[in-house]
Image: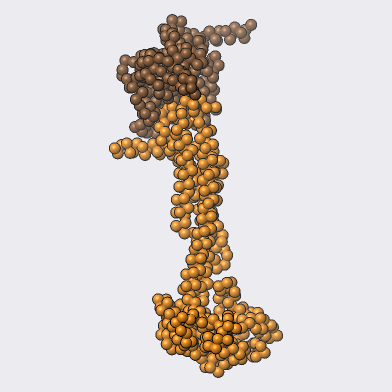
Amino acid sequence: MSTTVIELTDIRKTYRTGDVEVHAVNGVSLSIKPGEFVAIMGSSGSGKSTLMNMLGCLDQPTSGSYLLDGVNVAKLGRAELSRLRNQKLGFVFQSFNLLARTTACENVELPLFYTNPHVPLRERRQRAIKALEKVGLGARLYNHPNQLSGGQQQRVAIARALVNEPELVLADEPTGNLDTRTSIEVMGLFQALNDAGITVVMVTHELDIAAYCQRIIVMRDGRIIRDDFNKARIFASDQRAALDASEQHASLS
Amino acid sequence: MLQALTSSLLRAGLTAMIAFRALRRNKMRSILTALGIIIGVASVVSIMALGRGTQRRIQDQVSSLGSNLLIVFSKSRRTNAAAAGSGVSSNLTLQDVEAIRREVRSVQAASPEVTLTAQAVAAGRNWSTTIAGESPSYLRIRDWPLARGSMFTEREVRSAARVAVIGSRTARELFGPLNPLGQTVRIKNMPFTIIGQLKSKGAGIGGANQDDRIVIPYTTAMRRLTGEKYPRLVTLQISSDGLMSAAQEQVTALLRQRHHLTAERKNDFDIINQKEIADTVNSITNSLTYLLGGIAGLSLLVGGIGIMNIMLVSVTERTREIGTRIAVGAQPRDILLQFLIESITLSLFGGAIGVALGYGVSAAASMIPNFHPSVSIGSVVVAFGISFIVGVFFGFYPARKAANMNPITALRFE
């Protein structure tokens, strides 16, 4: 394992719409070490989503170099990028993107379907169950997504991201579709996973969600304008206690 | 190398599983989509089966004429006026028949024929029927057994005896259930003694009932009933299948010589070779069957378009699923294979049901008497092969569309 999970050097992404060139990402250099918990913030149009797509190997930069776990991504073709996503990355999306009418277990197994060399059925099932237990859904293995709450669905998605033991989990607005309590729950889970050594990079535009992370990167107009250690980091357990207290207070008065 | 192969085979197996599951989830839609193929394959299979049945039926009818027959027609009967003025007799004479019997060695039997339609009266009943003047070898030539009694003899032919062998239908019409043997039937007011009754043979070529007739010696028919001097036609039985065309040539040469035809003149008679009739009829039904089968095959094309349509809908509907699969590491060819297997499964499933339906139609049609349609393995294989090709062909475009999706837009698709 190399000393950095992500090493970006002068990454640029330029879209051409008609005659106008849009520099969605305009010279970003960044390095993220194993075990970090990073939030990428910015308003819409700041380039954070484009950057995230490139980090997730779903998109290729126009120029610059991207080393993912020491591998130069810029030189890889579609098939190799797929393999890289499968083995080194885990994705968590805002809208969960679980397969409907498919059990939690089968949803979590999905990346293992595409793992090369082939993972036998029994091992797939065992690893899926282990991942679901890790996110606290050991009792919901065979429920379909429509039988699960939003928070539970997102936890299934997190289990899916973890099942192939990736170097890096990428989360794109993971709490965007969740209420406050569930958001705390999900952020708590990310914190717990991060404590267990998993590197997490998260895109969000909410400051109070970014506050759970160790490091906050702020983007504007395709550039990084701030990259700080989060001095005011908050923890899910405290937040939950505070929320409980305020709700109790509200119901008393 | 081997490991890579097994690995990709396992992947294909897994992909197939995903595809089957997707089809199972949309049972109704899958069945409706396959319906086009079901109907197409069922019609191809059943039309081919019915075609084969028809062909067999016609073959049966042709062979019910008897076997290895040459039929010589006198042409002048049809162009009487023209022939009458030519001064040369172009009639087929009884001497011609004798000459053929004598000189063409492969001719086993010959029966001159004179036919007329007349009222037959017996026991107070009246029935209009075909009177056929034939020779004693007629029954052997036509491979036609007697139900009771016996056929008239050469002696009775020579003496133009008033004896008759009666067809089963005619016997029923005139005598009901009674035994007609020994009874008298009057034809054109002339009494005939019934000495035999034919077994039932059913419909001949063209559907005419062969059982409605009375067979009498040709001499009797010519001298006592019609007054004609020449037979209308002569049926010749040739000793073996292989000698048919040689015999046809010899008879032609002999008749041309006897009729004094010079090289530049056309035959004044027609020879029909039973085998040629069979072959012609065969090739006509064959091409009709293939034509109809081909038209039915067009519905497979329509079915294929239905599959393509539903696959396109399905790909659009599952855009996010596709995006997710690509994001978690599916290769484009995994996605391609997944959707291709779906469409192939749909069309093969439709093909299988279609073949079963085709068998059903064929079985139902075999309830028709004397009709034996049969589903050929060939048509089943072809129908399956075509539905597989339809699945691949019409599934490829939607599958490729899915495989080439940009995961970023696919994941955000609403």
At x 47% / y 25%, what residue is drawn?
B408
Whole-percent x and y of residue B170?
62, 80
| Residue B208 visible in the snapshot | yes
At x 46% / y 22%, what residue is drawn?
A15
At x 52% / y 69%, what residue is drawn?
B58
The hue used for chain B is orange
Closer to the camera in the image, A220 or A99? A220
Q: How is the image coloured?
A: by chain
Query: Is residue B168 positioned above or below B414 on the image?
Result: below
Closer to the camera in the image, A153 or B93? B93
The hue used for chain A is brown
Whole-percent x and y of residue A28?
40, 14
| Residue A92 visible in the snapshot | no
**Quarter occupied by the C terminus of chain A:** top right
Query: Is residue B376 positioned above or below B207 on the image?
Result: above
At x 56% / y 41%, what residue is drawn?
B28
In the visual, does A253 lie left or right of B152?
Answer: right
Whole-percent x and y of residue B127?
67, 81
Closer to the camera in the image, B97 or A123? B97
The residue sitting at the bottom extreme is: B159
